[in-house]
């Protein structure tokens, strides 16, 4: 087989062995020739026949061995092998072997030349191969060459196709190959492994037979040895310092790149220092930085195997009581305080009264004085309007913000100029249809995305009622914000897009979830705004269809039918919002406008006499006038300026410095209102959205487990859940199902059920990972993996 024929590719001298890495382990298993597979053998047999056929008249003068070598060289390419053999026999040259330009011999060439000249008579094919390179330049491989052919070896020829042959001297570097990690087969394949192994074997034999070169040639030969060094012949001991551990390819700057090299005919003298292969450093000399860190002994790398602890050599770091003495900061502070004291004393000694008085100025925490009002009396004396807070809910893009914008615009809460401005702005970004929605959606993110993100609050008044609008986001990603908005509301306005398919899409989306959350917050009355009626030409049948399907769902969610109000309207055009629709197509509707329906809603009784319970919906920090403010709904009780309040779960107190209701400063606020409280005497870190505010004398208990009456929206069974009380929430779980209850009477229907179906009510035990301020009668929402699975009323601590 080819490897046995002793072929060697001239370009593939051992120098290239560094590139043709092979796995020694692999080689051990396959001796030269053994690596050829049955496939190889078959390919060679068939290839030989075909090459002979193709050679025609040349066929007789070619031996099988030559054909094998050609096939092997050209990877069984018949055409190339035939061309090569014909050229060879016909004396033609391959393009590769066109006469070479005369070149100035480089140092490398000289070294190679010296090595070859000084080499003993060749006994192995390795040297033959090199010699043959010159003698038989047309041949890409060495075949039966006469030994000792004149060694006019030209290393440039080896690198005729490599771009780095002419690298400027200043760009040359050193490549250190680390063989300590074992060699891997880059070119892989049994053929190459076998080839490399064969060459190595031959070389070793040749080296063993040859006397060691001496004298001037030593360095050059040593270099070539190193260049062709196979890992198997390398010393492997780390500590064999004098012997080179790594083969080194050191390309010294060659004068040929900078200046013409002396005449090539001149007898080369002693090897040039530049080409002497130095022993490679096993470890780079320590950098200045490393030396600074680790000490000067690092400069002798071979002796240092373990890095000392950093800073060990630095004076002061050996001090085990490093903190005994004052730090630089301590020193500076001490100096500063000294300076201040000195200045003060000086001022006194000079009798400078002004300086003295300034120096004695102390900024004290201002104590807010309470007027000690009887808030309930004040409230009744004020002949107040009804207070109504409603949350606008519904699936994303069903028109909630637009409807509220229209309501405020038609009620003249928003003036024409502002609307025109919004319309212009909306037009500039191609969202003119959102101009009304922008009355509520004020943030740039909401405006650019056309989606409500946070709960927007606005106010308006009618003759009888002070309304607060809480415009909730419809997108499912913002359900926690929607819960926050709902926790402040008395009733919901559900917006449904009547246009084709949108209503159905909403039912699958957030329409139902919003209803369930609103109901679970204890809301009993609901207004359903069937919106975008203009898109269905005010079709009565569409309105009836929507009303029917929604009534079925709402009653299932425990809304009484008499407390459900449906209104067909178009928020964009304002029909049936404040003004009645004036279209013949809508003659069939004679009911309320949205505004009228809002006025008719029965509002829940306010618990003014009960202790204060205030749910924090928003926390504002950093205002210069008021560094800490909170907004939220008073669920029960009253409060006034000067009151001390307790924030839970932080259990920290604060003083109410000022109160605003609907952006107006007031002295007090009562249950049902959504005031902003400006606080003092508290670190802002203690307050978060969802916290509970109460009087220090009547705190809400922090609980970790409680029993709850739960209305199931999905199948409920003991499982991990997230529990929301307003926006305050905690991971937890439903620990057990105690009983299934009659939805209307609350009687126990079944004890310890294994599962609760959607629409059923059960008594469950909920456990929390962190304590939450929850007490009897408070509402909780239970969500599992982003879905609301139930809502409950806290009954007692478990
Ligand atoms: N034809 C028509 N389009 C409407 C009507 N009301 C709203 N729209 C359009 O519906 C789109 C969505 O309106 P929005 O008010 O942003 O909807 P939304 O429910 O507040 O959206 P989110 O708050 O992000 O859930 C806008 O392009 C509105 O112009 C309507 O009565 N008729």
Image (cartoon, helix red, strand yellow):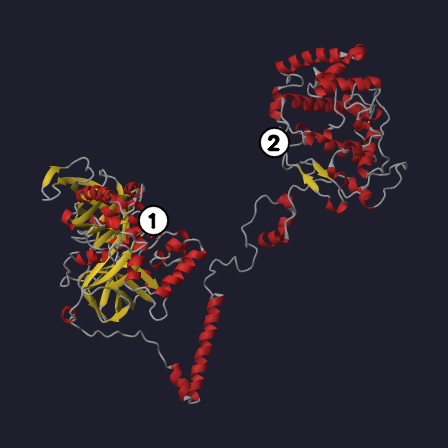
Above/below status of 82 relative to 284? above
The residue pinned by badge 1 equals 397
| Residue at position x 61%, y 52% in the image | 291
Q: Position of residue 391 (x, y in %)?
A: 25, 54
Is the residue marked by circle 2 packed among few (<14), some (14-19), or many (20+) residues within 10 Å? few
Q: Nearer the viewer, residue 362 or 537?
A: 537
Foreground label between 2 and 1: 1
**Residue wearing tag 2:** 182
- Secondary structure of the residue carrying tag 1 is loop
Q: Is residue 722 visible?
A: no
Mark 1 vs ligand 1: CB below 8 Å: yes
Q: Residue at x 74, y 11 (%)?
A: 53
Q: 495 or 783: nearer the eye? A: 495
In the figure, residue 172 lies in which quadrant?
top right
Q: Residue at x 35, y 64 (%)?
A: 416
Looking at this view, is 295 or 45 the one in front?
Answer: 45
Q: Is residue 94 visible?
A: yes
- Verify CB contact (< 8 Å) between mark 2 and mark 1: no
Q: Is residue 604 left or right of residue 54?
A: left
Mark pair 2, 1: CA separation: 65 Å
In the displayed structure image, the side of residue 342 where residue 528 appears, left or right = left
């Amino acid at each position: 087989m080819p490897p046995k024929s002793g072929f060697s590719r001239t370009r593939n001298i051992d120098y290239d062995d560094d590139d043709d890495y092979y796995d020694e382990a692999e080689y051990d298993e396959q001796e030269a020739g053994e690596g050829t597979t049955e496939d190889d053998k078959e390919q060679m047999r068939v290839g030989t026949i075909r090459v002979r056929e193709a050679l025609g008249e040349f066929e007789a003068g070619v031996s099988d061995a030559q054909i094998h070598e050609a096939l092997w060289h050209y990877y069984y390419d018949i055409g190339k092998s035939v061309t090569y053999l014909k050229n060879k026999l016909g004396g033609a040259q391959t393009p590769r072997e066109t006469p070479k330009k005369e070149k100035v011999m480089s140092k490398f060439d000289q070294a190679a030349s010296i090595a070859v000249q000084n080499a003993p008579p060749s006994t192995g094919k390795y040297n033959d191969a090199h010699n043959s390179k010159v003698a038989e330049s047309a041949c890409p491989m060495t075949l039966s060459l006469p030994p000792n052919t004149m060694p006019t070896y030209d290393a440039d020829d080896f690198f005729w196709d490599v771009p780095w042959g002419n690298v400027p001297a200043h760009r040359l570097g050193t490549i250190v190959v680390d063989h300590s990690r074992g060699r891997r087969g880059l070119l892989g394949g049994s053929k190459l492994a076998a080839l490399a192994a064969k060459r190595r074997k031959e070389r070793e034999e040749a080296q063993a037979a040859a006397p060691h070169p001496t004298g001037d040639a030593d360095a050059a030969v040593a270099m070539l040895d190193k260049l062709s060094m196979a890992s198997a012949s390398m010393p492997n001991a780390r500590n064999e310092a004098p012997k080179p551990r790594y083969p080194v390819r050191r390309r010294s700057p060659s004068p040929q790149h900078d200046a013409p090299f002396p005449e090539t005919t001149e007898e080369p003298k002693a090897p040039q220092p530049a080409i002497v292969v130095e022993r490679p450093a096993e470890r780079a000399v320590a950098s200045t930085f490393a030396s600074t860190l680790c000490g000067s002994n690092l400069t002798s790398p071979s002796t240092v195997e373990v890095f000392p602890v950093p800073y060990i050599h630095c004076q002061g770091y050996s001090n085990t009581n490093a903190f005994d003495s004052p730090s630089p900061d301590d020193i500076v502070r001490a100096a500063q305080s000294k300076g201040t004291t000195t200045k003060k004393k000086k001022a006194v000694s000079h009798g400078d009264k002004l300086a003295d008085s300034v120096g004695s100025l102390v900024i004290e925490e201002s104590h807010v004085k309470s007027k000690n009002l009887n808030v309930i009396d004040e409230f009744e004396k004020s002949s107040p309007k009804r207070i109504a807070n409603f949350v606008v809910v519904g699936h994303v893009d069903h028109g909630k913000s637009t409807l509220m914008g229209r309501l405020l615009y038609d009620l003249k809460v928003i003036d024409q100029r502002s609307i025109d401005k919004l319309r212009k702005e909306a037009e500039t970004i191609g969202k003119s249809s959102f101009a009304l929605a922008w009355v509520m959606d004020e943030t740039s993110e909401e405006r650019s995305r056309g989606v409500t993100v946070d709960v927007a609050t606005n106010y308006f008044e009618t003759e009888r009622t002070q309304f607060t609008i809480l415009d909730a986001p419809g997108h499912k990603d913002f359900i926690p914000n929607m819960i926050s908005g709902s926790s402040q509301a008395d009733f919901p306005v559900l917006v449904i897009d009547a246009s084709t398919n949108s209503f159905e899409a909403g039912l699958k989306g957030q329409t139902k979830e919003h209803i369930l959350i609103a109901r679970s917050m204890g809301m009993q009355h609901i207004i359903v705004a069937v919106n975008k009626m203009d898109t269905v030409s005010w079709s009565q049948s569409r309105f009836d269809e929507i009303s029917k399907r929604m009534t079925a769902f709402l009653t299932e969610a425990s809304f009484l039918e008499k407390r459900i109000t449906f209104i067909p309207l178009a928020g964009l055009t304002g029909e049936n919002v404040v003004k009645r629709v004036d279209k013949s197509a809508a003659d069939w509707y004679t009911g309320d406008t949205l505004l009228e329906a809002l006025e008719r809603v029965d509002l829940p009784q306010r618990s003014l006499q009960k202790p204060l319970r205030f749910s924090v919906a928003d926390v504002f920090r950093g205002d210069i006038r008021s560094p800490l403010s909170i907004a939220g709904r008073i669920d029960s009780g009253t409060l006034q300026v000067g009151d001390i309040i307790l924030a839970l779960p932080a259990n920290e107190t604060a003083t109410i410095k000022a109160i605003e209701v609907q952006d107006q400063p007031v002295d007090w606020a009562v249950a049902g209102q959504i005031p902003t409280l400006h606080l003092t005497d508290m670190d802002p870190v203690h307050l978060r959205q969802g916290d509970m505010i109460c009087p220090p004398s009547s705190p809400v208990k922090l609980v970790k487990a409680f029993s709850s009456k739960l209305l199931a929206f999905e199948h409920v069974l003991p499982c991990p859940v997230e529990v929301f009380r307003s926006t305050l929430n905690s991971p937890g779980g439903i620990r057990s199902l105690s009983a299934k209850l009659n939805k209307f009477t609350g009687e126990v229907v079944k004890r310890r059920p294994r599962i609760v179906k959607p629409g059923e009510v059960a008594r469950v035990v909920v456990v929390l990972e962190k304590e939450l301020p929850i007490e009897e009668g408070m509402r909780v929402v239970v969500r599992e993996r982003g879905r609301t699975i139930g809502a409950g009323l806290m009954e007692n601590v478990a």
